[in-house]
Image (tube, rainbow, N blue to C red):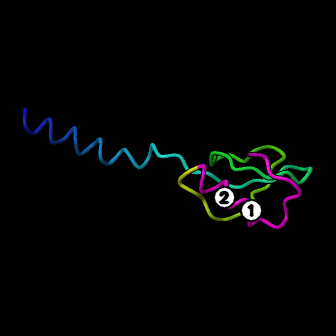
Amino acid sequence: MKKLLTAALFAAVMATPALAESFSLVQDTVGNCAAVVTSKSPYPGMKVVSDKTFTSWDDASKALDGVKVCSTFVR
């Protein structure tokens, strides 16, 4: 029983980082920029404007202010 609990705890600890969301900065065809949940497949009509990903939406939203190619920000 002790081995089973130890194995379950280990599996939970190893899986936790995989469940964390990351956020990217994207720009639409009009020039509006936003922070979105990072996706493996590209968003249609969107262009990624920063190579960096963020661990929280707040951090990504703050980083939008430093993006020069955006005409407006969607928050």
Q: Quadrant of the C terminus?
A: top right
Distance between the Cα atoms at labels 2 and 1?
6 Å
Judged from this view, the residue extending furthest toward the right is 30
User: Which residue corresponds to the image point at 84% horizontal and 49% vertical from the top-left?
Assistant: 28
In the drawing, what numbered circle is on residue 65?
1
Q: Is residue 71 magenta?
A: yes
Residue type of the residue flagged with mark 1 = Asp
Judged from this view, the residue extending furthest toward the left is 2
Which of the 4 quarters of the picture holds residue 69? bottom right
Judged from this view, the residue extending furthest toward the top is 1
Q: How many neighbours does mark 2 have within 10 angstroms: few (below 14), some (14-19), or many (20 or more)?
A: few
Instruction: Report the number of discs.
Output: 2
Spot occupied by residue 50 in the image (x, y as percentages of width and height):
70, 63
Spot occupied by residue 14 in the image (x, y as percentages of width and height):
32, 48
In the drawing, what numbered circle is on residue 6?
none
Which of the 4 quarters of the picture holds residue 71? bottom right
Dots 2, 1 in contact, CB < 8 A: yes
Q: Is residue 5 above or below residue 60?
A: above
- Highlighted magenta segment, given as a residue range: 57-75
The residue beneath circle 2 is 62
Residue type of the residue flagged with mark 2 = Lys
User: Which residue corresponds to the image point at 23% horizontal and 45% vertical from the top-left?
Assistant: 10
Q: Is residue 52 magenta?
A: no
Spot occupied by residue 38 in the image (x, y as percentages of width and height):
62, 49
Q: How many neighbours does mark 1 have within 10 angstroms: few (below 14), some (14-19), or many (20 or more)?
A: few
Q: Secondary structure at mark 2?
A: helix
User: Which residue corresponds to the image point at 10% horizontal and 39% vertical from the top-left?
Assistant: 3
Q: Quadrant of the N terminus?
A: top left
